[in-house]
């Protein structure tokens, strides 16, 4: 006697359809989740790419103008805080062999609509008087022009601490 195989196969086939549907729905959900995560990644990548957009030329021109004026103020031999700062730099750098690198300062400046530096941040020079003198030199007078209205702030500038005129900087060894 033979047993009917078709009903058994039909039953097995019926059981495999829901299992297949379950697998498909699970796979479908997994694909959607991965696609969603990739979409978030693309949005994140797009927003960080936008954040790294090129700096407008008029912002660069203003930063160069400001940097030149601030450099001049740091080297001003008639300004008492600038002179103290120069002398401090000379003492700090004498014999260190790091004159070129050691007198670089990165400053973050917020400039108001009148061209005045209303806030200045920088890493401490390690001396309270030198920090106060640098802050005073940066904020004592207004930059000759106001910043562009659309310019993001703070403006980050690299400045070089001037040494007194009679002190030549050390040559790199």
Image (cartoon, rainbow, N blue to C red):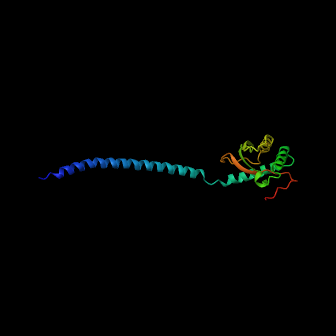
Q: Where is residue 127 in the image (x, y as percent from the top left)?
A: 79, 42
Q: Position of residue 117 (x, y in %)?
A: 74, 43
Picture quarter with the C terminus: bottom right
**Nearer to the camera, 67 or 61:** 67
Q: Does residue 16 appear left or right of residue 48 in this picture?
A: left
- Residue name at image x 78 percent, y 54 percent: 98
- Residue name at image x 84 percent, y 45 percent: 84
Q: Which residue lies furthest to the front in this view?
A: 1
- Residue name at image x 50 percent, y 50 percent: 41
**Nearer to the camera, 22 or 132:** 22
**Nearer to the camera, 173 or 170:** 173
Q: In which quarter of the image is residue 129?
A: top right
Q: Position of residue 112 (x, y in %)?
A: 71, 43
Q: Which residue lies furthest to the left in this view?
A: 1
**Nearer to the camera, 65 or 40:** 40
**How many numbered tags mark residues here?**
0
Q: Residue furthest right?
A: 166
Q: Position of residue 149 (x, y in %)?
A: 67, 46
């Amino acid at each position: 006697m033979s047993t009917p195989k078709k009903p058994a196969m039909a039953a097995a086939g019926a059981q495999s359809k829901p299992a297949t549907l379950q697998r498909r729905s699970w796979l479908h959900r997994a694909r959607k989740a991965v696609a969603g995560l990739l979409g978030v990644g693309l949005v994140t990548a797009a927003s960080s790419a936008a954040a790294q957009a090129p700096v407008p030329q008029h912002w660069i021109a203003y930063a160069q103008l400001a940097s030149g004026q601030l450099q001049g103020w740091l080297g001003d031999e008639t300004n008492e805080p600038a002179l103290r700062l120069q002398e401090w730099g000379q003492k700090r750098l004498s014999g260190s062999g790091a004159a070129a690198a050691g007198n670089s300062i990165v400053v973050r400046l917020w400039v108001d609509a009148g061209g005045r530096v209303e806030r200045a941040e920088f890493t401490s020079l390690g001396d309270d008087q030198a920090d106060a003198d640098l802050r005073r030199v940066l904020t004592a007078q207004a930059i000759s022009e106001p910043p562009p209205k659309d310019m993001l702030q703070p403006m980050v500038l690299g400045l070089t601490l001037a040494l007194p005129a009679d002190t030549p900087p050390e040559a790199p060894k």
